[in-house]
């Protein structure tokens, strides 16, 4: 393990943690935030007659969860590739 | 052909299919038996995880519960899906990289402690056993609902089928059977849902109908005119804080349940573990976004077709006749106007959860009783579908119950055979002997689960909160800290697990069995796992800082977990005598 390798690894770690943190913030915001904490004000907004907070709780947040995981998997592929981990 | 004949036919065909797969994937080595030889493709593992995850309760009861609870039912929808994000981002890739057989394996190795391993193994057994008893009961109930056999006979048939493919094939047999079971259950759920969506709203896709049709506004209007709270109004049954805590406890509990985590040991690489979590959630989301739509359709259909109608009029509806005969639907006439009134409150006096059909509850005006299960069960008839669709729903319910039961049974048997017997009692056991003990333990746990399925402890419904609460309060924090911090040590993990477990257990037992007031800000037994989890995080971190750091090789192990993923097996599959 030379120094260059260590520095690379540190960068990889930092990028990985930043990605996880960003996605988890979105995760918490759509589910615990929009669908629970702020559901009362958001229910005043209606889309096609459906209160928005309620819609987020029963449909929107679940769609977001699926998208978040695939974004993570794709971004990690790129990160692994950049750090030559996929050889 | 009658619906019953179709049901026998379809159920027999699916069962023969599962048996065939079980026979094809029989195994001889312990890597095959416990983790399917790390050889399951990401997509297949996703389907298997989805089948493992969605139980008879998800399939039969969840839409009904949401139908009754309205917004507050969202705790199940978000709670039982959101945990997969935590799994995919924080647990699955790292545990796959670690690459052993079970959750107690990780806990025992990472915290270099047999004590930690034993606590984890016992918790895994307890969590899985509470869960599996309900599944075996579910198998019996599906049999009795659709084929009119005794619940006991149904449980027995279920035991034989599960025993066959899990004893022969271990994790490998279970995995491939679960892939087949997922296909059966999702088709069985979606066909009636699409049909009823098209029938009620002219939009065939339930998710689109839920969003774009006028079903929700109509439901809200109907609710208000009958004296209910709006369907979409939050916090009708639970407080704001309790909804938050319960959702979080279910999410974290999902990510901490051993039978879910262990599925990610079966894939070939770290990369596959990430994708497989995504596929799993996509497959689960197909059912979980359909369920709330089904709930809304059923609710509106029940209100529209029953309220203000005369008894003779509703007897002309097929589904009313057929479900009234099973006591899932019942009527009374409190005000003697021979017209039905639907309103808030129970129609009959209740003995626990069983209504007393000869004693109407005169404190309210509601004259209709319906069991939540009717929402899914009656859908094919309401939408006027052919009898073979009813048969398919029966096969789907059985697939859901059997697949979950088999996954749980493998966790129980591997905790005893691998974590306790092989690791602690007889570490020199050879390969053949280890697989043999694993098989014996599968049979033993099927017998125990079957016993509880036939003689359910009266509190099965109440103890489900246990499984999630305990998984959230015990495993999740110490696995996360074990992966992301090098400083967390043995003393911290043991104290953390014990404090989370003891606090959560006493709170749930106190609330459920001794009539204790939910004294902590009114958080219910279902939601207390969140607090237990926070307590575990805090205790583990503080005790770790106050005691000696872990040895150098453990710090290296932790660092190796976050090194960029390398395809192929991360560790040598079998280290024999360790």
Image (cartoon, grey):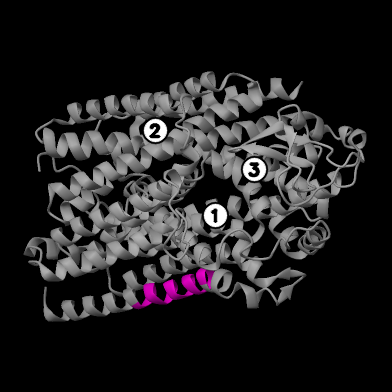
Q: Which mark is residue B66?
A: none
Look at mark 3 in the image and give the residue it sits on: B189
| Region of the chain picked out in magenta, as a range | A18-32
Q: Secondary structure at mark 1?
A: helix
Answer above or below: position of B414 versus B505: above
The image quadrant that residue A5 belongs to is bottom left
Specify whether B46 is left or right of B413: right
Look at mark 1 in the image and give the residue it sits on: B76
Q: Position of residue B223 (x, y in %)?
A: 78, 58
Query: Which numbered disc flags the more N-terminal residue, 3 or 1?
Result: 1
Res. B25 in view: yes
Say which chain tag 1 marks: B
Q: Front-most of B452 and B190?
A: B452
Q: Front-most of B241 and B493?
A: B241
Whether discs 1 and 2 lie on one chain: the answer is: yes
Q: Nearer the viewer, mark 3 or mark 1?
A: 1
């Amino acid at each position: 393990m030379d120094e260059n390798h260590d520095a690379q690894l540190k960068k990889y770690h930092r990028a990985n943690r930043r990605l996880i943190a960003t996605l988890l913030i979105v995760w918490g915001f759509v589910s615990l935030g929009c669908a629970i904490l702020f559901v009362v004000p958001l229910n005043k907004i209606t889309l096609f007659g459906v209160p928005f907070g309620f819609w987020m709780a029963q449909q929107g947040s679940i769609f977001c969860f699926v998208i978040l995981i695939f974004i993570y998997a794709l971004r990690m592929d790129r990160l692994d590739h950049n750090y030559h981990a996929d050889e | 052909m009658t619906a019953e004949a179709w049901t026998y036919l379809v159920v027999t065909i699916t069962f023969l299919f599962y048996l065939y797969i079980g026979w094809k994937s029989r195994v001889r080595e312990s890597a095959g038996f416990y983790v399917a030889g790390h050889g399951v493709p990401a997509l297949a593992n996703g389907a298997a995880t989805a089948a493992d995850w969605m139980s008879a309760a998800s399939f039969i009861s969840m839409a009904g519960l949401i139908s009754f609870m309205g917004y507050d039912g969202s705790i199940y929808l978000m709670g039982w899906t959101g945990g997969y994000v935590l799994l995919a981002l924080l647990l699955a890739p790292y545990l796959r990289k670690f690459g052993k057989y079970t959750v107690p394996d990780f806990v025992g190795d990472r915290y270099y402690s047999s004590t930690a391993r034993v606590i984890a193994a016992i918790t895994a057994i307890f969590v899985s056993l509470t869960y599996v008893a309900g599944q075996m009961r579910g198998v019996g109930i599906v049999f009795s609902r659709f084929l009119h056999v005794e619940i006991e006979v149904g449980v027995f048939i279920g035991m034989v089928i599960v025993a066959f493919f899990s004893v022969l094939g271990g994790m490998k047999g279970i995995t491939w059977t679960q892939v087949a079971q997922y296909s059966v259950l999702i088709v069985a759920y979606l066909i009636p849902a699409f049909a009823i969506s098209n029938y009620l709203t002219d939009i065939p896709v339930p998710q689109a109908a839920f969003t774009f049709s006028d079903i929700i506004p109509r439901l809200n209007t109907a609710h208000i005119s009958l004296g209910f709270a709006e369907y979409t109004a939050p916090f009708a049954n639970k407080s704001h804080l309790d909804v938050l805590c319960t959702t979080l406890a279910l999410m974290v509990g999902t990510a901490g349940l051993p039978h879910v985590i262990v599925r990610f040991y079966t894939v070939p690489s770290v990369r596959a573990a990430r994708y497989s979590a995504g596929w799993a959630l996509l497959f689960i989301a197909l059912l979980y976004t359909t369920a709330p739509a089904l709930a809304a359709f059923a609710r509106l259909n029940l209100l529209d077709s029953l309220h203000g109608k005369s008894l003779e009029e509703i007897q002309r509806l097929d589904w009313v006749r057929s479900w009234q005969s099973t006591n899932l639907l019942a009527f009374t006439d409190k005000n003697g106007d021979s017209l039905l009134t639907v309103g808030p409150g129970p129609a009959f006096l209740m003995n626990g959860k069983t209504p007393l059909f000869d004693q109407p509850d005169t404190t309210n005006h509601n004259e209709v009783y319906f069991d939540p299960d009717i929402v899914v069960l009656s859908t094919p008839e309401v939408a006027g579908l052919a009898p073979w669709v009813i048969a398919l729903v029966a096969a789907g319910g059985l697939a859901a119950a059997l697949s979950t039961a088999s996954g749980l049974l493998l966790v129980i048997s591997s905790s005893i055979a691998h974590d306790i017997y092989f690791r602690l009692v007889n570490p020199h056991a050879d390969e053949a002997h280890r697989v043999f003990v694993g098989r014996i333990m599968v049979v033993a746990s099927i017998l125990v689960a079957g016993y509880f399925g036939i003689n359910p402890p009266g509190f099965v419904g109440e103890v489900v909160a246990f499984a999630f609460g305990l998984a959230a309060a015990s495993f999740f924090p110490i696995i996360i800290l074990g992966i992301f911090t090098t400083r967390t040590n043995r003393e911290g993990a043991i104290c953390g697990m014990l404090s989370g477990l003891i606090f959560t257990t006493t709170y749930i037992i106190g609330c459920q069995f001794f009539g204790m007031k939910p004294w902590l800000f009114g958080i219910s037994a279902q939601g207390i796992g969140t607090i237990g989890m926070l307590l575990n995080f805090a205790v583990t971190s503080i005790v770790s800082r106050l005691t000696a750091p872990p040895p150098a090789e453990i710090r290296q192990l932790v660092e190796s977990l976050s090194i960029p993923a390398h395809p192929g097996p991360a560790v040598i599959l079998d280290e024999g005598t360790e």
